[in-house]
Image: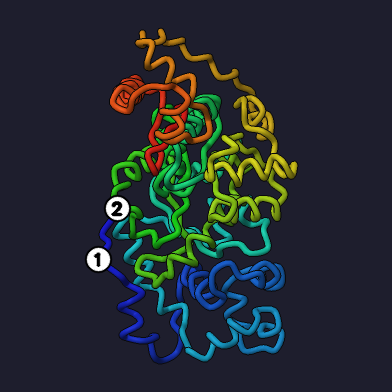
């Protein structure tokens, strides 16, 4: 994608086209209405219910009924005098760069998104647009800086779900979103990435190769036109409702109690989607969100992929147990140290006191346990079992 071309910014400089409104394609009217209402507008659903098409809404734009249905934001934006013809350059850019433009009434527009009160009125899509109509969708979301446990859980669950026919939906962000998409790519299965940035942008840029792999069998979508101005603090939260709506079930792998991931959960609850959460350590801040969902019975435990698959009408096998690895041979000093380390971080002073080892011997034992992958260092020279 060419990220330097920003047709909406060009239009902002030139203004709306003057003179009488020329005949525009239907997509242009939907693009006009989407910008007029703004993203995630709860008025969108009732406006569509009343007028049916964006062209009909355009023709009614000066009526009191339209003003009442569209809300104050749209009424304010009407004063700018923008017309559907202003979006013809955007349509032309999309055609040149192989970007599908899917208005609300397009046959390829996802049915799940048409049934929520705050739908996107236009989707921009790269890749295989037909996957947006596939059934058995499972959303997988989680922390951007996950633990090794979280990354492993996302990979194992994602592999099982993708191989069983589920279409994984996520946000292509760093961390667990990317792990979910990678699982689908490994299984040569379709996956849908929902961007919180314009379709012309790959964010993070390091995911360019992942995006290309997704587009081979799946789709990347955004409700933000190429070059659209975006406040990423807002747009990433707004896109979470699309992930939730597209998901027949939502799986939360790891999440802090206050996080963007938990906003996706709130949308899934609002839309009545079943929610699953991966149980985590009671000592890990990244499991506070998932464990709270389980404790409050807002989610079922995501332990076996078969439970998740059943929620979206699929059947699959349980996770195959990993082949046991032979335990490394450890000297007596290392075994003594290992016996004093658990899930709660313990510092050098406490270890020295509990093991009775001199500090240099203790440090040697700790190094051996780290190399063996049996313990992990924590801030403040503290250690936990891995």
Q: Is residue 360 above or below residue 236?
A: above
The front one of 91 and 178 is 178
Mark nearer the N terminus (2 vs 1): 1
What colour scheme does the image use? Answer: rainbow
Front one among 333 and 313: 333
Q: Measure the alpha-carbon separation of dots 2 and 1.
A: 14 Å
The residue under the point 63% across, 50% down is 265
**Quarter that holds the N terminus:** bottom left
Q: Quadrant of residue 7?
A: bottom left
Percent x, y for residue 173?
42, 49
Residue ID for mark 1: 4
Q: For residue 138, which quarter of the picture?
A: top right
**Most extreme residue toward the right, as rendered?**
297
Vertical placement of residue 182 versus 34, above or below = above
Q: Position of residue 226 (x, y in %)?
A: 36, 65
Pointer 2 local density, CA inside 10 Å: few below 14, some 14–19, many at least 20: few
Instruction: Label 2: state its secondary structure.
Output: helix
């Amino acid at each position: 994608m060419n990220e330097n071309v920003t047709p909406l910014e060009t239009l902002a400089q030139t203004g709306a086209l003057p003179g009488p409104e020329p005949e525009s394609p239907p997509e242009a009217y939907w693009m006009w209405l989407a910008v007029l209402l703004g993203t995630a507008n709860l008025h969108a659903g009732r406006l569509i219910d009343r007028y049916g098409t964006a062209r009909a809404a355009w023709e009614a734009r000066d009526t009191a009924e339209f003003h009442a249905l569209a809300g104050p934001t749209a009424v304010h934006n009407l004063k700018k005098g923008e017309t559907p013809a202003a979006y013809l350059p955007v349509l032309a850019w999309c055609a040149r760069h192989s970007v599908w433009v899917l208005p609300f009434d397009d046959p390829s527009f996802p049915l799940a998104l048409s049934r929520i009160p705050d739908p996107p009125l236009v989707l921009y899509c790269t890749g295989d647009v037909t996957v947006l109509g596939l059934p058995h969708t499972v959303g997988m979301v989680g922390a951007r800086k996950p633990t090794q446990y979280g990354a492993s859980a996302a990979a194992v669950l994602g592999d099982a779900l993708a191989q069983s026919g589920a279409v994984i939906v996520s946000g292509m962000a760093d961390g667990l979103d990317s792990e979910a998409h990678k699982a689908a790519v490994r299984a040569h299965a379709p996956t849908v990435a929902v961007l919180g940035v314009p379709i012309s942008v790959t964010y993070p840029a390091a995911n360019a190769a992942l995006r290309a792999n997704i587009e081979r069998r799946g789709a990347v979508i955004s409700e933000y036109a190429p070059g659209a101005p975006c406040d990423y603090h807002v747009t990433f939260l707004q896109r979470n409702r699309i992930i939730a709506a597209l998901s027949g079930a939502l799986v939360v792998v790891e999440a802090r109690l206050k996080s963007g991931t938990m906003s996706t959960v709130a949308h899934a609850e609002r839309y009545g989607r079943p929610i699953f959460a991966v149980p985590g350590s009671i000592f890990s801040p990244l499991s506070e969100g998932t464990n709270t969902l389980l404790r409050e019975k807002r989610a079922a435990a995501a332990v076996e992929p078969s439970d998740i698959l059943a929620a979206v009408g699929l059947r699959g096998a349980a996770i195959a147990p990993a082949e046991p690895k032979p335990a490394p041979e450890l000297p007596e000093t290392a075994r003594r140290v290992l016996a004093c380390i658990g899930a709660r971080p313990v510092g050098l002073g406490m270890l020295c006191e509990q093991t009775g080892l001199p500090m240099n011997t203790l440090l040697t034992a700790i190094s051996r346990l780290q190399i063996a992958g049996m313990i992990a260092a924590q801030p403040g020279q503290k250690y936990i079992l891995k």
